[in-house]
Amino acid sequence: MTLHQNFINGDWTGTEAVPNFNPSDTNDIVGEFARGDANDVANAVTAARQAFVKWAHSGPMERHAVLRKASDEILTRKEELGRLLAREEGKTLAEGIGETVRAGQVFDFFAGEALRLAGETVPSIRPGIEVDITREPVGVVGIITPWNFPIAIPAWKIAPALCYGNTVVFKPADLTPGCAWAIVDILKRAGLPGGVLNLVMGKGSVVGQAMLDHSGIDAITFTGSVATGKRVAAPCAEQMRKVQLEMGGKNPLVVLDDADLDTAVECAVNGAFFSTGQRCTASSRLIVTDGIHDHFVKSVTTRMKALVVDNALKEGTHIGPVVDQNQFEQDEKYIAIGRDEGAHLAFGGERLNRETPGFFLQPALFTEATNEMRISREEIFGPVASVIRVGDYEEALAVANDTPFGLSAGICTQSLKHASHFKRNSEAGMVMVNLPTAGVDFHVPFGGRKGSSYGPREQGRYAREFYTTVKTAYIQP
Ligand SMILES: NC(=O)C1=CN([C@@H]2O[C@H](COP(=O)(O)OP(=O)(O)OC[C@H]3O[C@@H](n4cnc5c(N)ncnc54)[C@H](OP(=O)(O)O)[C@@H]3O)[C@@H](O)[C@H]2O)C=CC1
Ligand SMILES: O=C(O)CCC(=O)C(=O)O
């Protein structure tokens, strides 16, 4: 089996390798991937610092060309890369291809942005002086990504980093190195100079920690759990470097009496269970008013019974496996906690046996849940959702906002008054009306409030707030 090596200073390197398993079929080894260490991180940082001198001053056309070529190749190979994604992460093939397309679109967007770099000239308050405001790259950016969007999240961090003239040390999740390796290989062949993008695969506790400890990294962008996010933030504050954290969610979907039932059910099922519920934007709290509650629960349950949970690569599968044994145990643990707390397991929650040995879990729906229960407050990150019954819109809004998180929030209603009020008063970074809480556009800001996010927004033009630093120059000609 081919060894997929790390990529440092323009060279493939590394001999120690570990197999990467398919969560739909643990007999299937996706590939052998190198595991780096602190020494590799040090070499990658040195290479990135050296390459920064030139890349920071590269012209917009050079950056545009590389990003554009990468986009073209990702889109051309979307079936193959989507299959790799589904095989290593467990999303269905359709979801894997969809995410690959999203990654291609992100590179295309930032290829365009590279041609739109601009500054401002403003008159000074002092006569005869000119003031220029320009943006410069931050330097060497450390990128640490999770397993749940193994091609889209690396894309929406790497593309803006390169677009704005930064160089990169990239550590993907240990569970999903295949997509990360493919993106780096594509960018190398797209003409990126050596050292501009360095890939160090391996464990967070080793490679990620070495990145946090290395003073040669100027900024760190991270997506993952709250616990790790806090570990990333602390040394960044200590060393006064820029940090951007995208973490968990406990996203509410409010369903009001006047909602269109079919729309509400689709939003709930898609938001809560698609991608096996492994999305930080998943709707894990379904907050439903009294009048529609019983119809809603019945219809969601009926819809859940029709979901096919099976091998991610099999045609007809709606829900793939949980990503690995650890996550499976976490999901099972929370299902037990929900029962112990007194919520009613209305459907699902059991392990499923399929033709291939994988981590298949029947999506679970709790009813009679309260917002105080741990299943309503802590991120489970699996196909588990709870229905919380409320009396009216005001109570629904209060419950929706009563959470340590604030990433995405949704409402299903036909009332413009309630939709507008919710849009204004929801304490979340993203609000959806008659749409699932998960599934976002690639060209607009992504991020949340409270415990969900820290630092500037990701994606779209707003990404430049993190990947650039502003310089104000005063000139007396
Ligand atoms: N909100 C979100 O988007 C996501 C949330 N999660 C949540 O996190 C839980 C655990 O998933 P997991 O992937 O382990 O999430 P983590 O937060 O542990 O991992 C995210 C990334 O951080 C790395 N990392 C881990 N420890 C350190 C460290 N000490 N220093 C620097 N980097 C580190 C990981 O490396 P490694 O390769 O070793 O994992 C991975 O690349 C999930 O059950 C879920 O609740 C997970 C993924 C995404
Ligand atoms: O819902 C989406 O489209 C994106 C979700 C995401 O980025 C995440 O789960 O980390």
Image (spheres, rainbow, N blue to C red):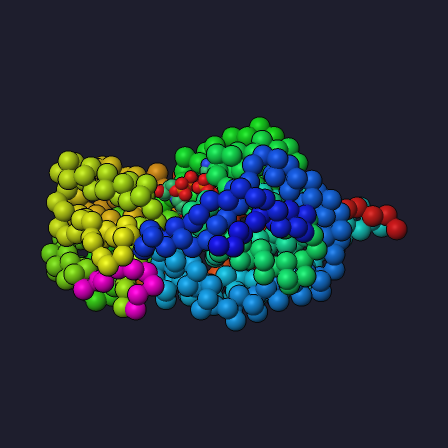
Question: Farthest residue in the right direction?
Answer: 477
**Which residue is more in the foreground, 371 or 366?**
366
Q: Is residue 161 above or below residue 190?
A: above
Front in this rendered view, residue 322 or 227: 322
Rendering coords of residue 141 (x, y %): 61, 44
Magenta span includes 65: no
Name the residue furthest top: 238
Residue 356 location in percent, x, y? 27, 57
Quick check: 181 left or right of 125? left
Q: Quadrant of residue 59?
A: bottom right
Ligand 1 is found in the corner quadrant, namely top left
Magenta-highlighted residues: 306-315
State left or right for residue 54 relative to residue 273. Answer: right
| Magenta region, main secondary structure | loop
Q: Is residue 449 in sight in this rendering?
A: no
Question: Residue placed at 34% from the left, 52% from the top?
Answer: 27
